[in-house]
Amino acid sequence: MVTTEERPDRTESAELLARARAGEAEAYCELAQASETRLFQQAVALCRNPAAAEDLVAETLVEAWKSLHRFDRSCRFSTWLYAILLHRYQKLVRRARSRPVPLAALRPAESSERESLLERSPDPRPLPAEVLLQKELSAQLQEAIEALPPKFQQVVRLRFYEQASLPEIAGALNLPLGTVKSRLYYALENLSRMKSLVNLFKLPEDT
Amino acid sequence: MNVNWLFNPCRRHAVDLGLLAAGALARPDGDRLAKHLERCPGCRARLAQLRTLARELTQDGRNLPSVEPSPSLRRRWMAEIHRIAPATGERRSEDRSRAGDWGAPALPWLTGRRLAWSGIAAMWALILFFRFSAPDAPRPMAAAIPPPTLRQLLLAFRTETHELSAPTPAAAPPDNQPSAPDATAPRSECPENHSTKNLNTA
């Protein structure tokens, strides 16, 4: 009944990383290219807008290059990049909320979003009902996660969207392991009590 | 401190329950939790609820949109990195040389907030050490006055008891009241007078 941590194989090359840390831009570009597509997909899942996602990925990769000396290999390189992406995304959301322009301006309407995704998709066939349903569930989950405080969002996304282990999350966010554990618990606790998710996934309500 | 937490095993295992649902629990905690789960149907139901949620989140995390970044994205960030690379390299080498001047930190984990709290704790430890470890040297004022002898103490005690037993004129009773007993006569109900008598006889 006790589960173990899933730790995917480390794909980043130690040699490339050492060269990049020594200041070799080519080595860093090679290293970052391996994570670029996944990072972009994660950014699209966050922003739901490919143009905004591209900006976010570009900012993230440049920021990662500037602070590469802080990467201590306590987590995967891709996890570290995703943590930077999340940080920048939350900054973007905070900035957008503080402006008079509504946040909706960053996100196009559902139909145009789907069209833009279809244009870029390698297989642009009409989406079957199951996929649409999955998209609906995904949108509900994203809304629920975004209702959490930012510190809980980071832990939930790193755990479930990056499949990072708890020590990796602690390394990526530079937090003690105990803090990561309690944040993950409180995030799940808050999510499980949200009415929208209780109805959506038929979660049994507490008595 | 919330005392209920100590006596409520469900609350004690709440965090572990969440971690178990998220598939991120180490074995020793899991064994303790397994024993609790065998006995507690409420926690079993809660675990099922959290597991459903964790499964949906994991599923959603694996279903990332199947989109490819445009080639212009790669060109964009690579160009930016090559543009800033010389400056970044210089800054890093400066950092390295600065670190070389000072040497590697003796305690690399002792930074930021930890360093601040450690400093405060060390300061308090020093204050407490000097407060309680100082030798019991006589204070200057106390050293100037010699301690009283036993005879002086007894005399002072006798004087005090005489003053207490003497009647005061203001406390004289009115005429219609029964007169007070003679102040010189010993009062049997007062134990202090016995001690005075004993002292006088002694």
Image: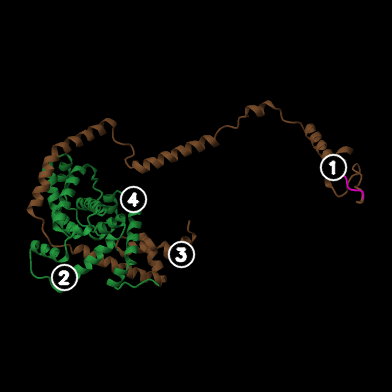
Tell me, for residue B8, which label it has, or none.
Answer: 3
- Name the element at disc 4: loop
Q: Amino acid at mark 4?
A: Pro
Tell me, for residue A176, which label it has, or none.
Answer: 4
The quarter of the image holding the C terminus of chain A is bottom left
Q: Quadrant of residue B53?
A: bottom left
Residue linked to disc 2: A131
As measured in the structure, the alpha-carbon distance from the residue carrying label 3 to the one carrying label 4 is 26 Å
As measured in the structure, the alpha-carbon distance from the residue carrying label 3 to the one carrying label 2 is 44 Å
The stretch drawn in magenta includes residue A58: no
Residue at mark 4 shares a chain with residue at mark 2: yes
As measured in the structure, the alpha-carbon distance from the residue carrying label 3 to the one carrying label 1 is 68 Å
Position of residue B75 relative to residue A194, above or below, is above
What colour is chain A? green
Residue B35 position, x and y percent, is 40, 67
Q: Residue at x 19, y 71 (%)?
A: A133
The chain drawn brown is chain what?
A: B
Observer-side mark, 3 or 2, equals: 2
The stretch drawn in magenta includes residue B172: yes
As measured in the structure, the alpha-carbon distance from the residue carrying label 1 to the one carrying label 4 is 77 Å
The chain letter under disc 2 is A
Q: Amino acid at mark 3?
A: Asn
Residue linked to disc 1: B170
Does the image show residue B202? no
Mark 1 and mark 2 in contact? Answer it, CB < 8 Å. Answer: no
Residue A4 position, x and y percent, is 28, 61
Residues drawn in magenta: B167-175
Q: Amino acid at mark 2?
A: Val
Q: Residue at x 83, y 47 (%)?
A: B191
As measured in the structure, the alpha-carbon distance from the residue carrying label 1 to the one carrying label 2 is 105 Å
Q: A41 or B47, which lies in front?
A: A41
Q: Amino acid at mark 1?
A: Ala
